[in-house]
Amino acid sequence: MRADATVVQVATSYFPGDVAFDTQLEQQGTGDGGSTSRLAELGHQQTRIRESVDVRPPSKKEAEALGVSADRLVYEITHVGLTESGKAVEVCVHVMPITLWSLSYEWPIDQPAV
């Protein structure tokens, strides 16, 4: 992804073969709405996500792709898209320089039964 001429992240997505083989998901450009829309069209709508965030130094290849020195830190966000039945239909690993990103999350808190 680019903002101006700056690479702001590198991301790699993985899809189960029984979901993606012989579909547009095998293409680099999946069209309007991206992989989320293609999955929904194929009957694998994501209804929730799970993410884990780590901070680490980039690999040599990542540092080169991002245009940062190897002593800089990056976020590694592992994003898992899940269907209503709980099947993981997408795993995407995002690697992003921490100097270019601020992370903010919000989610509902379960209310206690009355």
Image (tube, rainbow, N blue to C red):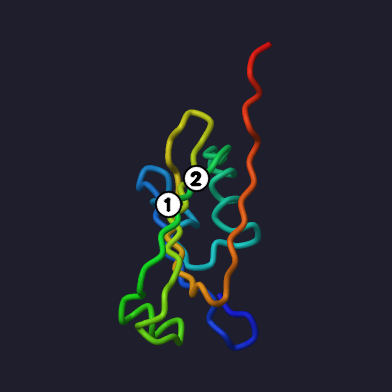
The N terminus is located in which quarter?
Answer: bottom right
Q: In the depicted view, which residue is nearer to us: 94 or 88?
A: 94
Q: In the depicted view, which residue is nearer to us: 56 or 18?
A: 56
What secondary structure is marked by label 1?
strand
Q: State the residue at coordinates (45%, 66%).
A: 75
Residue under label 2: 81
Q: State the residue at coordinates (36%, 68%).
A: 56
- Can you name the residue that lies furthest to the left here? 60
Kindly indicate the quadrant of the structure image that contains residue 57: bottom left
Which comes before the other along the chain, label 1 or label 2? Answer: 2
* x and y percentages locating residue 62 in the rendered image: 37, 78
* Amino acid type at mark 1: Val
How busy is the neighbourhood of tag 1: few (under 14 within 10 Å), some, or many (20 plus)? some
Q: Is residue 95 left or right of residue 36?
A: left
The C terminus is located in which quarter?
Answer: top right
- Can you name the residue that lies furthest to the top here? 114
* x and y percentages locating residue 52 in the rendered image: 44, 51
Relative to 15, is 87 above or below? above
Using the image, tell me which numbered label, if any, was put on residue 82: none
CB atoms of marks 1 and 2 within 8 Å = yes
* x and y percentages locating residue 42 in the rendered image: 53, 42
* Amino acid type at mark 2: Gly
Give how far apart the Cα atoms at labels 1 and 2 are. 6 Å
Residue under label 1: 91
